[in-house]
Image (tube, helix red, strand yellow):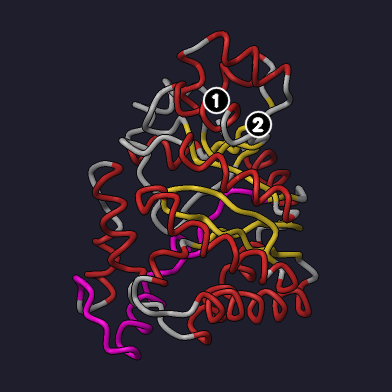
Amino acid sequence: MLTPALDAFIRRMPKVELHLHLEGAITPRTVLELAQKNDIEIPASDLAGVERLFHYRDFGEFLTVFMALARAIVTRDDFARLAYEIGLSLAAQNVRYAEVMFSPMQHLLRGIPLGDVVGGMADGFGRVHDETGIVLRTVFDYGRQYGPALAWYVLEVARESMGQGVVGFSIGGNEIGYPPEPFAEIYSAARQMGLGVMAHAGEVVGAASVWGAVDALGCARIGHGIRSVEDPLLIDHLIAHQVTLDVCPTSNVLTGAAASWQEHPMRYLYDAGVALTLNTDDPTFF
C-alpha cells in the first residue's frame, strides 16, 4: 500500500524523467484550444469529448488517437506552449532533469518545419529553466514504420539542432513488422555525431526486438524492454553490458503490453539485476 508517509517521500524525492513524449503529455484543454485556434478538426468538439478520446482498448487504438490529436499542434508557439506546460508539470513533481521526445514524422508530413518544433521546444524549455531551474532536453523519436530512407533527413536536422538542446535520437512507433536492424547505419551515424541513442523495443514485440536494438543498433538504453524476460540469455546480456531499460509500467498495463500490475515483469527484471529507470511515457494517456 502507498502510505501517506511514502507518498510524501516520493513527492519530495529529486527525479529524472527519461521516457516522455511531448505529444503524449498535452492536456485535453490544450488539445481543444489549439485545435480551435488552428481550425483543425479533431474527433471531439468539447472538453468532455476530448477527455473521452483518452480511453482506448489496445496499443493500436492508442497510436491512432495519439496521431489524431497531434494534428492540433501547428505553430512554433504551439510547441513552445506544450514544452512550457510540460516543464511546469515536471518541476511540480520535483523532476530535476528530463528528456522529452517528439515524433518528427507526425509533423513533417503535415508540412511543419522541424525547425519550428525544435525551436518552439527550446523556447518553452528555456522559459521553464529560467523560472524553476529544471533542465529539459529534446530527443527526436523517429517512427520506424516510415523506414530508414527518410530517417537520414530527420537525423541531419537533429544534428543541426544540437545547439538548441537536442541530445538524442530514437526509433519509436509500431514494433510489429518493423524490426530495429534496418536502422543500424542511422544509429552508427547518430553516435558519430555525438547524439545519444535509444530504441523502443520489447514493448509489444518479444525479445528479438531487444536483441536487435542492442546488437544491431548498439543501444545502451532501451525504451520499455519488458519482454526481455522471455529470454534468460538476453537478461544476462543486459546485465553484463550495463544496458538500462527505461520502463513505463502504467503505460504497459493500460496499452495491454502487460496483462496486469501483478504480471508486469518490472520486479523480476529488478531482482535479476537489470538496470531500470521509471517513467511516465505519455502521462495524459496513462
Residue at x 51%, y 36% (from the top left corner): 224
The residue sitting at 55% across, 54% down in the picture is 20
Answer few, some or many: residues within 10 Å of disc 2's Cα (few below 14, many 20 plus, some between 14 and 19).
some
Q: Amino acid under label 1?
A: Met
Residue tagged 1:
266
Q: Which one is in front, 88 or 230? A: 230
Q: Per the image, is 249 magenta?
A: no
Q: Which image quarter holds the N terminus? A: top right
Mark linked to residue 276: 2
Amino acid residing under circle 2? Leu
Give the image quarter of residue 277: top right
Q: Answer yes or no: do the residues labelled 1 and 2 have beta carbons within 8 Å? A: yes
In this picture, is 90 found above or below 164? above
Q: Nearer the viewer, residue 14 or 273?
A: 273
On screen, residue 49 versus residue 242, left or right, reads: left
The stretch in magenta equals 17-44
Q: Under tag 2, what secondary structure? A: strand
The image position of residue 170, as x and y in percent, is 55, 49
Outermost residue, top side:
232
Q: Secondary structure at mark 1?
A: helix
Residue 136 in picture, x, y percent from top left = 70, 64
Asked whether, in this view, residue 19 is left or right of residue 254, the answer is right
Viewer-proximal residue among 215 and 37 = 215
x and y, in percent, of residue 286 in the image = 42, 50
Q: Is residue 40 magenta?
A: yes
